[in-house]
Structure formats: structure tokens, C-alpha cells
Amino acid sequence: MAGSKMDIRTNVQSKGWSRGKIAFAIFLGVLVVFAPVLLQGFQTMSFFVRVLGIIGIYVLLALGLNIVVGYAGLLDLGYVAFYAMGAYAAVILGEKFVTAVQMISNVGLRDFLVSSQFIVMLPVAAIIAALTGLALGTPVLRLRGDYLAIVTLGFGEIIRILATNDFLGLTKGAYGMMAPVAQPLGLSQLQLLPVAIPAIGFNFIFSVNLYWYYIVVLLIVLAVFVVRRLDNSRLGRAWVAMREDEVAASSVGVNIMTSKLWAFALGALWGGLAGVVFANAQGFVSPESFTFMESVFIVTMVVLGGMGSIPGVIVGAALIAGIPEMIRGVAQSPLLAGVIDPTLASAISGYRYLVFGLLMVIMMAVRPQGMIPSTRRAQELHPEDEKVLEEEDQSLWDLKHGADRSEHDL
Amino acid sequence: MALVEATNTTMQFGGLKAVNDVSMHIDEGEIVALIGPNGAGKTTFFNMLTGIYKPTSGKLTFAGGSVSGKKPNEICRMGIARTFQNIRLFSNMTTLENVMVGRHTRSKAGPLQAVLRTRGFKREEAATVAEALKRLQFVGLADKANELAKNLPYGAQRRLEIARALATEPKLLLLDEPAAGMNPQESADLTRLIGRIRASGVTVLLIEHDMKVVMDIADRIYVLDFGELIAEGKPEEIQKDPKVIVAYLGMGAEAMLAQA
């Protein structure tokens, strides 16, 4: 084999990018950047921008949880806790930051710092969430499977209940808290650039919703970038090995505890970031936003989309977060005002979870590997690939027809 | 100097002493076989030596350091690698990836370097691939680098497990029934492979039922029965040892042999 070119792939998932794939990526990029501009421009459609922002936050959460569930294979039913940590950190520490900055006498600098407080809060909240992940992980990661799931579920509830009970006087309990600053960095400048084409009813103003949408998109791009690189590294391989066989992995030198802790911390980090964006985009944080159902939804996004698959998880999150919001949005939008009765509209939004549950059951029965499965995960869940089936058919045929097997046996 | 030194090691599960007061030593460069009927405690001994179990009592040292109470990954780092009786590969990883995981203790790039794709990371990653390929070539699987481990034939899976263990750069390799389920041709190949492993400077301790393999290759043999060490010696001594014959063939065998 010396001299001959051998195609060595270091990862089962990494294959070259075909031209079609690149074209599709560019198309997708353009769509993600410009579609919201169009939606924003038309009054009747502008609510979709808000919906897209919400979807984006869930995509970010799902990408984070995917590290824990998809890569490391740990079922975390309390992921929302990290989201809550991020959101509350953004509000509580953001407020402190703004107060501290008020001391600065230079008006220009002061205003700049005040409006950019959320940018400062992003890394702060990410670190807090990651440390919380470590703090939770250290005692509980000795548990496996169902037991771990139950403990993480409990943790998620603890965080929510602490927030509800105004823990240490920090969270203002069930009343919730306002985000420190309404106008984020650069928004007022962006709003000076209105584009209007009255002839077709296009009237674009750079809205707050659009602003946060773009922030989320940037964070998602960052997350995809980071997660892909992690997957294709020493740590990523350790995660797969550990998921497949813990005993074998540790006997070839993988430190199970450290690898799991990394997964927990690196997963939690994105929850924290999503929390900051959520708190600032919403302008308000309260414990209601961090119920157990939220955790379940995020897990569902990962599972339905395809554990361990980045495109899968994104699509899963977009659908699960998007469909109910779309239904609600459309039902209440000015587009349909007068077309459907408002009570019917709210009834439709009420039934959305019924449809959703049904979809889930069907999905798990027919396609347990998810909508866009990762190559590897698909193999794990569907071991009976065609080759094996073929061999089995052949052996059955042999058996039935008493083929020359008997000769071998002699 | 003894590489492995077991002094009165006992492993007790409830009322059962799976390994009872066993003392043995393995010198550097040796090939030592551990034999005995099923349930004699051979695999239990392996599990103690690799940190899966902690010995109930006794001393177990490797290269001068105590092994007991250490975690499997720490012991791997000390220089002991193993294969398993029931092949335990990462079945949905490729052949190459399996061996790359074996390089875990010999590389150190953390998540931050992985994300930033630093020069050090790239260099280490390239070295990991190169080292893994070297091990695959050693066991004759280089042309199967991109195949999923589970799609390999049985014999190749056994060899892959050996390659993965060798990738950790062990001083001592533990092989748990490497010839199980192999035909005579395959076990002859395996015997040669084990010889080459020793030649590369790795000490080997193997559990094996295939007596041809054991007698061909082992320098010394330890025989366990019901958790106790009943014999120790060179292959030709063990073959004649009456206690070993009784353990394998049952009471009366000795008498029958005496009559014959």
C-alpha cells in the first residue's frame, strides 16, 4: 500500500462536500439571512420574525442538549435548569453591571456599555451554566440511564422552585424580573435605515425581534461550528466509545467521569447562552418559562430530529418549536382576522399538543433514529442492515432447500 | 525484576472466593498462560489486574506500583492493556477509529484546542491516525481501516481488539481467550501474532483453552482451579502434572492414566 493513495477517514460521519451540498448550504444561508427581512417588511407577516427568534432559541438549546444526549449518551431531563441559570444570570448580573457602569462619567462610553450589557453577559452566563453543569455532574454522573434521568429531572425542578421561592432574595419569585435594558447595542442606529416600498405595502423597520433573531442565528452558527469540531476530536471519539461500551472505553484509557463531565459542562454552556438571549429578547424572566415540560420538549427535539446529528437536531427543534408557534401565530394573525373565529383559533392552539404527541408516537415506532439521523446513531438503532438481512435470507433458503450444508457438517 | 507481582490476592463475592490466596509473578518479556477449567477464576484475576474489581485482600503490583483500587483508565495509563473474552469493540466506529480511541492516554488535546484547531491539535491528530494505522498494519487490518468494526469477520474483530490494546503502548498485554472460536489456521496465525507482540517488547499474559496455542507459545503456565493456584511451571511440566490432569479430567483420571 506504500505509495498508493488510501482514503483514510478518521470519522464515520465525515465525507467530502458535494457541489449540490454546497449550493444547498448557500441557498439556506441566504434564506436564513434575508427571509426575515421580507417577513418584517410586510405588516401582516411580521409576527413570524418573533416566531423565528423563538425557534432559534430552541435550536440553540437542542444543539446544547445534543452534546449530552446525542454524543455522550446521557439522558438529561433537567436541561432547562441551565437555560434558567442563563436567563436569571443575565437579568440579575446584567442589572448589577448596568448599575456599576452608571458611575462612568463619559456619557458616550456609559451608553455604549449599558446597551452592550448582554454581550458581556453572554460569556458570564455561559460560564455560570457550565460550572452549574459541573457541580451537578460531579455527584450524579456515577448514575446510569434511568437513574441519571430522574436525578437531572429533580435538578431541573429544584432550580425552578428556587426561582419561584425568591431564592436568597435574588429572583423576585413568581413575579419575575424585567431585563435591565430595552434597547440593545446598535439597534437605534439600525432603525434609522427604514426601507419602504409603499406600492406593494413593504415597509421595513429593523425591529427588536429581528435584532434578536440575528443574534440567535450568530450563536447557532457558533454552536454548529464548535460542536462539529468537538465531535471530530479526541474528546468526541471518547464520547462515542463511552456510549458504545463503557467498560471497554475505560480499559483503553478513557476517563469516563471526565468525559461525562465535559459533555455536561459543554452542553450546559449553550443552555446558558440561550437563556441570556431569551431574557433580553423577552425583556422579562419568570419561573413559568422553565417548567419540566420545556426540558421534555428539548429532549423531544433531539430525539425526533436525530440524536447526534446536527442537521437533524436543528430540523427537530425548528419543527417542534415552530409548529405550535406557527399554529398559534397564524390563528391570531391579522391575516386570518375575520376568517376564523378567535375562540376556534385558541382551540386550535390548545389541541396542538395532541397532534404533537401522536406525531411523536408514530415517529418512534417507524423511525426511531430520528428525521435526519447521524450515520452512526442510525446504525446503532437499526443494526439489521441490508447485508445482514440478505445473509439471513440466504441461510433460511439454504435451510429450507437442504442445500449442500449437510456435506459441510459431515 | 518481576513486572507483575501478586501476593496472596483474594477476590471474594459474598461467600464465593473466585480467586483464593493466589500468588504469582510475571517477568518482563515473558509469555505467561493462565489456564484452568471454566469458573476457575482466570477472568476474575484479569479483572483485578485491570481495575474492574478491587481485590478483597492481598497485594497486586505492576512495575513496582500498586494496582489495587485504581480505575481501569489509570491502570491503562500505567501500561496494562487487555482484550475481552466476549469481544468488546466499539461496533459502530470504524476499524481505524477503534484504534484511535486506544491512543486516548497517549494524546492530550482538550476541547479548547479541538475547537480552535490549533497547530498542536492538528499535529497530534495526524500522529494519532499514523500510530493507529501502524497498529492496524501490525495485525494485518490496514486495508479495512474504514470498515465498521461490527462488519468485520470474527477473526478480524479479535485482531482489531488486539490492535486497539496495543495502541495504548502497554508494557503488559492481557489476552482473554484470544483463540476462542478460531479454526486451526486462524489460531496458528494468532500464535505467530502473539510471538511478534513479544518480540516488539510487550509482555503477554493470556488466558486460553486452546492447549495447542498455550503449549506452543507460553514460557510458563499457571493453573487455576476453583480460585486456587494448583500448579505452575513450564508447558512440559504442566502437561504431566497429576493435579492438572485431575482438574481437567476429573477424579479417576489419574488412576486410569496410571493403569494405562
Image (cartoon, rainbow, N blue to C red):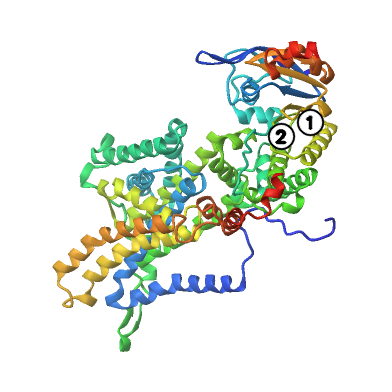
**Is the residue marked by circle 2 packed among few (<14), some (14-19), or many (20+) residues within 10 Å?**
many
Q: What residue does disc 2 label?
A: B178
Instruction: Identify the residue at horizontal 37%, vertical 55% (top origin).
Output: A277
Residues at marks 2 and 1 touching, judged by CB atoms closer than 8 Å: yes
Say left or right for B180 vs A94.
right
Label 1 SS: helix
Looking at the image, which residue is at 55% across and 39% down?
A259
Identify the subunit bearing mark 2. Answer: B
* Crowd rating for badge 1 (residues with CA inside 10 Å; few <14, some 14–19, many 20+): many
Residue B198 x, y percent position in the rendering = 82, 31
Residue B213: give its label.
Answer: 1
Please name the amino acid that badge 1 sits on: Val
Res B40 seen here = yes
User: Which mark lies nearer to you, 2 or 1?
Assistant: 1
Question: In the image, what residue type sits under mark 2?
Answer: Pro
Q: Secondary structure at mark 2?
A: loop
Q: For this rendering, which residue is in front, A201 or B213? A: B213
| A119 is higher (above) or lower (below) than A48 | above
Residue furthest to the bottom in view is A199
**Rendering coords of residue A274 (x, y %):** 40, 53
On the question of residue A108 being in view, the answer is no
